[in-house]
């Protein structure tokens, strides 16, 4: 029963992440009228910068002590209190500081829950387990967007308020219902864990995809959302629908993609998905508003081809006693990309607008090229692996 419980907790943990997206405009320049392009984008970046600190610290501490659940409970408590304070009458600088703390606690919780799920999985079912974890993550993100649109239709502050209470409730649930799995691997000192991760060079493959993929997600939940609100004139409920159109097929196909990655060429799936995803991002800036929902649904299908294989590969490449640290590194790479995505979008939009250009279409093309360039950069490695060990990266 541990794996279904973990999946439910992960699903609920992810709800506040995209619940903020439909009310991004109201939580930034709507609440603080003096904020500019970069400041508004920082709202989505600040918590990802926090994740860069929280995930590795939690992963190293968890692996060195061979404990997961106590750390998860503490992180959820911090996450909940941060969200509740965001909804109070405070300045924008304090809001960004709380977003940093929130991101630190959220990503610590997520990384340790992912490691706990892998601990409870049988080795031959790792693909299905991590595919299920990915599905829980993406389902939570998919549900959060329309939920945030509904909750925020009356007051944007309702979103962090309800999210905070949900995190506090999850802390109680984890303490009562989840247990650590028996761990036979030897405990390593955090310094030894860092050395082992640095020596595992193949981890650069899933980490690179996590970074670029999440960079584009950060761009979507900030620049693209602001584009929908300011250029297309979409209201928060419609923005939530657009995000759900992307996330629902992504969520539903993540588990099958994880299963398929056991038999298909995982790196090939990731490369093909990146190229198709780049085409999708370019099209977002050019299609009429009525087509955006359908295009987002197609993008969600492609995204599943990229995410599940990279998550399975990162888990398989983890050494003995290094799962939490390895998955924390995966999440750090993704969080760094997510943090830089809004900043990249904000800077490019501001610079192009100052130069007298209509900024959005060129920015969509520039961000899309990061996916295509990554796929091309991996081509020599893919060809070498295809010649030496068949068409798949080696299993653990």
Image (cartoon, rainbow, N blue to C red):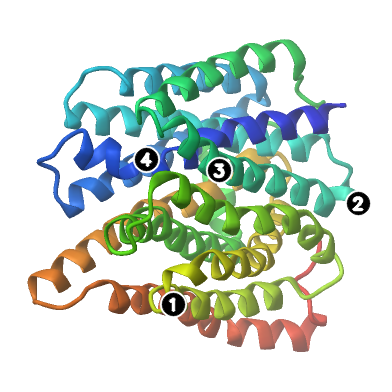
Find residue 345 and report its horizontal and vertical position in percent.
29, 63
Mark 2 lies on a secondary structure that is: helix
Distance of label 2 from label 1 (alpha carbons): 44 Å
Mark 4 Cα within 10 Å, few/some/many (few <14, many 20+)? Answer: many
Residue occupied by mark 3: 328
Quarter holding the N terminus is: top right
Mark 2 Cα within 10 Å, few/some/many (few <14, many 20+)? Answer: few
Task: Please tell me whether residue 317 is drawn above or below residue 277 in the rendered image.
Answer: above
Question: Measuring 50% from the left and 16% from the top, which residue is drawn there?
Answer: 165
Sequence-wise, the earlier of marks 1 and 4 is: 4
**Labels 2 & 4 near each other (Cβ < 8 A):** no
Find residue 54 and report its horizontal and vertical position in percent.
45, 34
Quarter holding the C terminus is: bottom right
Task: Please tell me whether residue 388 is drawn above or below residue 270 in the rendered image.
Answer: below
Residue occupied by mark 2: 124
Distance of label 4 from label 3 (alpha carbons): 29 Å
Residue occupied by mark 4: 23
Residue 136's tag is none
Q: Nearer the viewer, residue 293 or 125?
A: 293
Find residue 285 and report its horizontal and vertical position in percent.
38, 74
- State which quadrant residue 90 falls in: top left
Question: Measuring 38% from the left and 21% from the top, which residue is drawn there?
Answer: 82
Residue occupied by mark 1: 287
- State which quadrant residue 37 falls in: bottom left
**Labels 2 & 3 near each other (Cβ < 8 A):** no
Sequence-wise, the earlier of marks 3 and 1 is: 1
Give the foreground label among 2 and 1.
Answer: 1
Mark 3 lies on a secondary structure that is: helix
Question: Measuring 33% from the left and 46% from the top, which residue is drawn there?
Answer: 45
Image side of residue 274 versus residue 256, left or right: left
């Amino acid at each position: 029963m541990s794996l279904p419980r973990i999946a439910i907790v992960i699903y609920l943990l992810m709800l506040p992440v995209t619940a903020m997206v439909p009310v991004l405009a109201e939580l930034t320049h709507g609440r603080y009228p003096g904020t500019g392009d970069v400041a508004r984008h920082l709202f989505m970046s600040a918590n990802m910068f926090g994740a860069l600190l929280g995930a590795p610290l939690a992963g190293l501490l968890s692996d060195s002590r061979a404990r997961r659940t106590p750390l998860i409970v503490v992180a959820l408590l911090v996450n909940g209190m941060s969200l509740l304070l965001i909804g109070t009458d405070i300045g924008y600088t304090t809001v960004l500081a709380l977003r940093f703390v929130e991101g630190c606690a959220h990503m610590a919780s997520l990384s340790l829950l992912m490691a706990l799920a892998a601990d409870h999985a049988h080795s031959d079912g790792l693909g299905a387990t991590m595919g299920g974890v990915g599905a829980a993550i993406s389902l939570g993100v998919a549900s959060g967007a329309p939920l945030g649109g509904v909750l925020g239709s009356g007051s944007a502050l309702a979103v962090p308020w309800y999210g905070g209470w949900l995190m506090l409730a999850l802390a109680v649930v984890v303490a009562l219902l989840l247990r650590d799995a028996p761990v036979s691997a030897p405990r390593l000192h955090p310094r030894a864990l860092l050395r082992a991760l640095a020596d595992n060079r193949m981890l650069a493959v899933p980490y690179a995809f996590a970074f670029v993929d999440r960079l584009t997600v950060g761009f979507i939940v900030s620049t693209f959302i602001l584009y929908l609100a300011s250029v297309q004139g979409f209201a928060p409920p419609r923005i939530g629908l657009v995000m759900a159109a992307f996330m629902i097929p992504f969520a539903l196909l993540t588990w099958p993609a994880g299963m398929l990655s056991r038999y298909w060429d995982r790196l090939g799936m990731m490369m093909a998905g990146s190229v198709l995803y780049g085409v999708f991002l370019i099209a977002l800036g050019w299609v009429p508003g009525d087509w955006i929902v359908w295009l987002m649904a197609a993008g969600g299908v492609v995204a599943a081809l990229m995410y599940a294989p990279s998550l399975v590969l990162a888990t398989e490449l983890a050494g003995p006693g290094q799962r939490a640290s390895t998955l924390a590194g995966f999440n750090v790479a993704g969080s760094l990309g997510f943090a830089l995505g809004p900043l990249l979008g904000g800077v490019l939009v501001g610079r192009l607008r100052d130069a007298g250009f209509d900024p959005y279409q060129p920015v969509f093309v520039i961000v899309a090229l990061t996916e295509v360039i990554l796929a091309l950069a991996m081509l020599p490695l893919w060809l070498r692996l295809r010649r030496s060990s068949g068409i798949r990266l080696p299993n653990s």
